């Protein structure tokens, strides 16, 4: 089977799946109403009005699928905008939370436009390229959409895959579908990998990388105002120890609450508090209900929500916050504050096979990380953090709780190690900029 036929079959299947995708969005919108927005962009490529680029200027189109990718590429985008302030920008994403994050991060860019990426069908890609008028397309981490990248390259757009990462498992799948993956990878004008291990996987598929520049997430700018807010929360609570469950995924909160109950965590450590921050905002209510049930079983005070514990614009705690032993972090964009309130962070996504969440941000704020066995999304970062003693690994959450209760010492050293680990891996932004600057 030729690559052209394979691409045609892929496009046909995706076209036939459009009603299924519409039903999926409707289902997601039950919990998160924002999924009812942007359908004309996703299904018809009817984007917000984007003006043509004036002569002598360029527009860079950045696609970051969701929150993590939006933050990851932000140091490079901001640096590029400082060096080339005349360049214009188009920012696309896939999820509503990603769109909100992009608007928060990039609204100050020159003549920037935001939109949802249309589905990867040839006619939608063609309409999008015609409207965006991009000189370059930057895709972040693993977004290898065949029609998008092949269509952009055919239209003369300089394409780049930035901060690229690929697990060996994904690499095997790409190799299995080499008829389509190889042409797509070879269509890229620039491929910048995070690690040499990622580079090896790409090379085995048949596309040598142009550079290995490290992980851009180490260069994300710190937010001291949020760190200060987190410290004010800490002073408002009466807890002597604070453990944070950061970016927890579905099913993991129940595992933690069960581990707290089985280990008699709050009986053995009555002045501790546990904060849970779910990865997805549509799950806030569901997780809070779990916490209320668990608090009753464990005989501790009713949990509180961060959103209901402080008046708007104030860091003065409302009644009941200081006595709470379970706190739900139900706010967006405040992870630095949560890391600053905690003594250590349990890494969400690592206790069930989700692959783990970003541990770099926690370390950047001096919060040591305890993680489970599943960190394949951040394999290199996890290995380096373990070697630097900025992180520990446990097989399950009960083991982590028991270790903490056994008289764990050395968190001050772990905090110093976390800071040092985060600082020691900076520099990917300048290295990536230098590579791109030669090709764009």
Image (tube, rainbow, N blue to C red):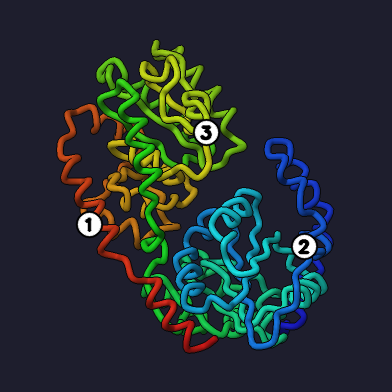
Q: Along the horizontal axis of the image, is 298 left or right of 205?
A: left
Residue 440 position in % (x across, y down): 55, 86
Find out whether the residues at labels 3 and 2 contact each other: C-beta distance under 8 Å: no
* Vertical side of 40 occupied by 120: above or below: below
Instruction: State the residue at coordinates (30%, 65%).
Output: 425
Label 1 to label 2: alpha-carbon separation: 44 Å
* Vertical side of 100 occupied by 145: above or below: below
Instruction: State the residue at coordinates (38%, 37%).
Output: 229
Mark seen at residue 48: 2
Q: Quadrant of residue 230?
A: top left
Label 3 to label 2: alpha-carbon separation: 31 Å
Instruction: State the residue at coordinates (41%, 66%).
Output: 216
Category of crowding for the residue at label 3, using alpha-carbon neighbours closer than 10 angstroms: few (below 14), some (14–19), many (at least 20): many
Category of crowding for the residue at label 2, using alpha-carbon neighbours closer than 10 angstroms: few (below 14), some (14–19), many (at least 20): some
Label 1: which secondary element: helix
First along the sequence among labels 3 and 1: 3
Residue 407 position in % (x across, y down): 17, 29
Label 2: which secondary element: loop
Label tally: 3
Q: Quadrant of residue 341?
A: top left
Q: Name the residue beneath numbered marker 3.
A: 330
Mark seen at residue 420: 1
Instruction: State the residue at coordinates (60%, 53%).
Output: 98
First along the sequence among labels 1 and 2: 2
């Amino acid at each position: 089977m030729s690559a052209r036929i394979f691409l045609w079959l892929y496009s046909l299947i995706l076209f036939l799946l459009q009603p299924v995708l519409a039903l999926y969005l409707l289902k997601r919108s039950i919990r998160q109403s924002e999924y009812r927005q942007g359908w004309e962009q996703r299904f018809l490529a009817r984007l917000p009005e984007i003006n043509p680029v004036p002569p002598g200027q360029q527009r860079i189109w950045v696609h970051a699928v969701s929150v993590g990718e939006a933050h990851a590429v932000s140091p490079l985008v901001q640096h590029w905008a400082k060096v080339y302030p005349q360049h214009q920008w188009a920012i696309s994403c896939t999820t509503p939370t990603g769109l909100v994050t992009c608007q928060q991060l990039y609204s100050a860019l020159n003549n920037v436009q935001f939109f949802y990426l249309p589905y990867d069908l040839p006619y939608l890609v063609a309409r999008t390229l015609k409207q965006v008028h991009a000189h370059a397309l930057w895709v972040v981490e693993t977004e290898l959409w065949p029609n998008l990248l092949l269509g952009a390259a055919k239209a003369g757009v300089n394409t780049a895959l930035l901060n690229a990462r690929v697990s060996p498992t994904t690499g095997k799948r790409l190799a299995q579908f080499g008829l389509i993956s190889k042409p797509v990878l070879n269509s890229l004008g620039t491929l910048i990998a995070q690690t040499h291990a990622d580079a090896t996987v790409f090379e085995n598929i048949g596309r040598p990388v142009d550079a290995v520049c490290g992980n851009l997430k180490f260069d994300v700018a710190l937010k001291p105002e949020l760190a200060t807010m987190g410290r004010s929360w800490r002073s408002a609570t009466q807890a002597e120890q604070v453990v944070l469950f950061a970016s927890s995924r579905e099913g993991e909160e129940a595992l933690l609450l069960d581990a707290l109950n089985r280990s008699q965590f709050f009986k053995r450590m009555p002045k501790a508090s546990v904060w849970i921050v779910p990865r997805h905002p549509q799950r806030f209510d569901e997780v809070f209900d779990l916490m209320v049930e668990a608090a009753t079983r464990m005989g501790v005070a009713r949990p509180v929500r961060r959103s209901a514990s402080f008046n708007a614009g104030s860091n003065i705690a409302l009644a009941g916050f200081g006595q709470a032993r379970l706190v739900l972090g139900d706010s967006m964009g405040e992870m630095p504050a949560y890391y600053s309130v905690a003594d250590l962070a349990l890494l969400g996504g690592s206790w069930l096979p989700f692959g783990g969440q970003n541990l770099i941000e926690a370390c950047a704020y001096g919060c040591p990380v305890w993680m489970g066995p599943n960190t394949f999304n951040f394999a290199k970062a996890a290995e380096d953090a373990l070697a630097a003693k900025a992180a520990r690994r446990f097989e399950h959450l009960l083991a982590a709780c028991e270790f903490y209760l056994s008289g764990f010492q050395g968190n001050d050293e772990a905090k110093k190690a976390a800071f040092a680990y985060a600082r020691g891996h900076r520099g990917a932004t300048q290295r990536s900029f230098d590579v791109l600057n030669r090709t764009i």
